[in-house]
Amino acid sequence: MTQGVDVVGLYVRDQDEALRFYVEKLGFRVHTDVRNGEYRWLTVQHPEQPSFQLGLFKPGPPVHDTATAQTLQGVVAKGAMPPLVLVVDDCRAAYERLSARSVEFTQEPVERYGAVDAGFRDPSGNGWKMIEARAKPQSQRAQ
Amino acid sequence: MDQSPELLRRLLRAKDRMDGASHEEWPIHRLAQVSAVSPAHFARSFKEAFGVPPHRYLLTRRIERAVALLRDTDLPITEVAFQTGWKSLGTFGRIFRDVTGENPGSLRTRERAAPHGRNHVPECIVRAAHRPDLKIAVSEKRREKAVERMDL
C-alpha cells in the first residue's frame, strides 16, 4: 500500500506518561520520537499494524498559544475527544491483562449483539473502546 | 475556562463511574470521593465541566439504559425499572415520560417496529448518540408541558 492514512494523532497531557501507557501497558511500539526545541514528534504503532502510526502530541507552543493549549487539554481531560476503537482477538483476556497493568477501565467486557466490548481511558482522558473481532467471517461483512 | 485539566480528569472519573454503574446510588459524597473534590464543591464543579448537574446526568444515563433494555430485551417493565436503578415503578414511569415524552411500553412497541442499522456502529457509541438530551430539570420540563396544555 502506498496511499492511505499514515498518522492520526491524539492530544495527551504529558508525552512521557503517554509513551509509558501506550508502550508498557498497551504493548505498542515507538515508531518515531524526535525533538525540535520544545516540540516533540512522537508516534507509536500497534505491533500488528505497521502501516499506521498513532501520534501522541502535547498541545502547546509553537503550534498553540497558551490559552488554546489549555482549552485542548481541558477537552481531552473531560473525555470529549472522539471515540477510539481498538480491535482485539479476545476482549476478556485483554481486559484481564490490561487490568493487571492497572489500565483505567470505564467498562468491563460486555457481550452485545454477539460482540464483546470493554472501555478504558488513557491517563490524559482519551477514551478507547476495546472490541473483540467477530470470529465468524459471515457476521464480519457489513452488507 | 478556569478548571484545570487535572481537576477535569478527576471529574471525568466520577462521570465514568456513573456511566459504568448508573443503576447504583450516587450520592454527592460518593462522587466527590471518586473525584477527590470536597463534597461542597463537587456538584458545582461537575456542572461547570459537563454542563449538567451530576444527578441529572445520572438520570439521562438511567433512561438511556432503560430504553436499550426495552428495545433489546423482553424484560417486564418492572424489571427494567428495577435494573436501571429505580426503587418505585411509579417514579420510573413518570420520569421516563417526562424525559422521553412516551410511556415505557409504547416506546418499546415503536422501537421494535423501526428498522435500524446499528450493526455498523459500536453499540456503546450508538447508545451515547441516543442519550436523552436533558437540558432542563425534569420538574421544569413537566411544568412547561403543563403550561402548553393550558395554552390549548
Image: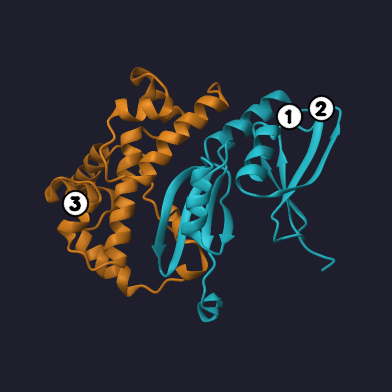
Mark number, residue A60: 1
The residue drawn where x is 40% and y is 63% is A111
Q: In the rendered image, is residue B136 in sight?
A: no
Badge 1: residue crowd in 10 Å (few <14, some 14–19, many ≥20): some
Badge 2: residue crowd in 10 Å (few <14, some 14–19, many ≥20): few
Q: Secondary structure at mark 3?
A: helix
Amino acid type, residue under disc 3 in the picture: Phe
On the same chain, marks 1 and 2? The answer is yes
Q: Position of residue B127 (x, y in %)?
A: 41, 56
Marks 1 and 2 close (CB-CB < 8 Å): yes
Q: Position of residue B140 (x, y in %)?
A: 26, 37
Mark number, residue A38: 2
Amino acid type, residue under disc 2 in the picture: Glu
Badge 3: residue crowd in 10 Å (few <14, some 14–19, many ≥20): some
User: Which-is-in-front pick, marks 1 and 3?
Assistant: 3
Does A21 sit left or right of B59 as displayed?
right
Q: Which chain is cyan?
A: A
Does A72 sit left or right of B6 as displayed?
right
Residue labelled with disc 3: B82
Residues at marks 1 and 2, CA–CA distance in whole angstroms:
9 Å
Marks 1 and 3 close (CB-CB < 8 Å): no
Q: In the rendered image, is residue B110 in sight?
A: yes
Name the colour assigned to chain B in the rendering. Answer: orange
